[in-house]
């Protein structure tokens, strides 16, 4: 089961980079660029779509992330990792005393962030299976860590959106991923009804990754539900 993370970060470039890196690792990511947006998403998630962990920037355009931490601690003990450029010791102590599980100063490496996330989740009894990062099905090979896609031993160039869509399917290879989930994870929650995006990009992926796009062997359709990648070869 994917752990659901709310990433609260107003820097668009950093937010996008973190979102992509965490998606590759198998996390289910929600993003917010402001305090108001984060509060709305948190309220919407309760209780049926609960957030498992929050990554919280402090310098938000409409307030301080510390206010959101106070809200979260009034309603539960969801792990919160502060990600901030503020490096003063007093700031760190104040946030940790107020209930943050960890405090990571920017810039930081994604490896360190992932390790701290695993620790925070383990403290709450959440243990996740490692994400599938390498996929092989016949002539198709996808290596998410290396960001490499190969067909018949030849590198295939994908656009960023094509790659994000394929990576999302790789993480649940063999399982159907609904139209709504794909649209949310690849394009964002505001695009959940725009299935034409999905049809367009799935057609482009099939043109690049199938020997016969009219008879796909890798990128399969579950009519009316979603798409799935064929089961990976047993050797993987």
Image (cartoon, rainbow, N blue to C red):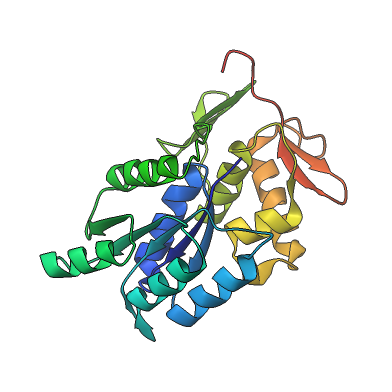
Out of 182 and 76, give the one closest to the viewer: 76
Residue at image position (50%, 48%) is 23
Using residue 109 as the reference point, say whether residue 14 is left or right of it.
right
Residue at image position (45%, 49%) is 22
The furthest residue to the top = 235
Give how far across and how far down residue 130 sits, in percent. 49, 32
Using residue 129 as the reference point, say whether residue 229 is left or right of it.
right
Give how far across and how far down residue 59 sits, in percent. 30, 77
The answer to whether residue 88 is seen in the rendering is: no
The furthest residue to the left = 89
| Quarter of the figure with the C terminus | top right
| 168 relative to 81, above or below | above
Quarter location, residue 9: bottom left
Give how far across and how far down residue 172 sits, in percent. 64, 37
| 137 relative to 97, above or below | above
Give how far across and how far down residue 83 sits, in percent. 30, 62
Residue at image position (65%, 33%) is 173
| 126 relative to 197, above or below | above
| Quarter of the figure with the N terminus | top right
The furthest residue to the right = 223
| 73 relative to 156, above or below | below
The answer to whether residue 58 is seen in the rendering is: yes
Residue at image position (72%, 30%) is 230
Using residue 101 as the reference point, say whether residue 7 is left or right of it.
right
């Amino acid at each position: 089961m994917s752990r659901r993370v709310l990433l609260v970060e107003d820097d668009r470039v950093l937010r996008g980079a973190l979102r992509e890196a965490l998606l590759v690792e198998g996390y289910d990511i929600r993003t917010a660029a402001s305090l108001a947006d984060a509060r709305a998403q948190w309220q919407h998630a309760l209780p049926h779509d609960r957030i498992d962990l929050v990554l919280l920037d402090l310098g938000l355009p409409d307030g301080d992330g510390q206010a959101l931490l106070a809200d979260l601690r009034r309603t539960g003990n969801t792990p919160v990792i502060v990600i901030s450029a503020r490096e003063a010791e007093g700031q760190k102590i104040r946030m940790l005393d107020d209930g943050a599980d960890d405090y990571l100063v920017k810039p930081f490496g994604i490896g360190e962030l992932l390790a701290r996330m695993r620790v925070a989740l383990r403290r709450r009894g959440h243990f996740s299976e490692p994400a599938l990062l390498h996929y092989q099905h016949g002539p198709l090979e996808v290596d998410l860590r290396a960001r490499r896609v190969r067909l018949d031993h030849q590198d295939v160039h994908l656009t960023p959106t094509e790659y994000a869509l394929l990576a999302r399917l790789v993480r649940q290879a063999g399982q159907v991923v609904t139209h709504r989930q794909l649209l949310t994870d690849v394009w964002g929650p505001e695009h959940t009804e725009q299935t034409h995006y999905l049809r367009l990009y799935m057609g482009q992926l099939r043109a690049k990754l199938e020997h016969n796009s009219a008879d796909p062997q890798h990128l399969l359709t579950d009519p009316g539900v979603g798409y799935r990648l064929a089961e990976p070869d047993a050797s993987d």
